Image (cartoon, rainbow, N blue to C red):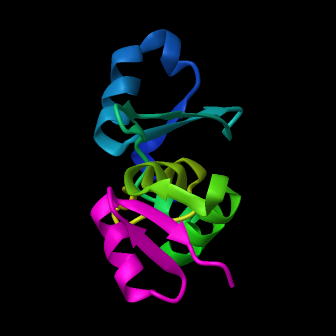
Amino acid sequence: MDVKIDSLIPFDSLRTDLEHVFSVVEKNGKVVLLKDNKPAYIVLKYDEKGIVDENIADKHANYTLQEAMKIVLSEADNKTMHASELADEIYKRKLYLQKNGKKAQYTQIRARCGHYPDMFEALPGNIIRLKQS
């Protein structure tokens, strides 16, 4: 994990200067609280999309989108899912993330079916089916 030097803050700052701690979290996205000069806790910024961490794409998402689609669809009933549900499940499991750390959009899922017609079938209503191999 990359941590900026100004994000290293003594744990006692929670008692003495809480406002400063949260201003650093706001600025850098995270703070590492130190006890005895060793990392003890991490405070991360959170928004409506979840925890904000600029390195999330490096920590997860070891699959291409089509590989992630295949994994999720192989476990789904009838090997079919709506494209938006498929996108949500892939993101929830962190199987694939865009370079900016965001989830793939259902339109991207739908387009990937056209690039891999041997693997996927796009049915009416944005339903995606994994073809049997």
In the image, 128 versus 95, the foreground residue is 128
Please report the residue visible at 52 percent of the width from the left and 89 percent of the height from the top: 118
Residue 22 is situated, as x and y percent measured from the top left of the image, at: 37, 25
Q: Which of the image's four quarters has the N terminus? A: bottom right
Please report the residue visible at 67 percent of the width from the left and 65 percent of the height from the top: 74
Q: Quarter of the image holding residue 62?
A: bottom right
127 part of magenta stretch:
yes
Q: Residue furthest front?
A: 124
In the image, 123 versus 3, the foreground residue is 123
Q: Position of 45 compared to 76: left or right?
A: left
In the rendered image, is residue 105 in sight?
no
Q: Which residues are magenta?
A: 105-133
Residue 9 is situated, as x and y percent measured from the top left of the image, at: 50, 34
In the image, is residue 55 above or below residue 32?
A: below
Please report the residue visible at 39 percent of the width from the left and 71 percent of the height from the top: 122
Residue 108 is situated, as x and y percent measured from the top left of the image, at: 32, 69
Please report the residue visible at 34 percent of the width from the left and 59 percent of the height from the top: 126
Residue 73 is situated, as x and y percent measured from the top left of the image, at: 60, 63
109 part of magenta stretch:
yes
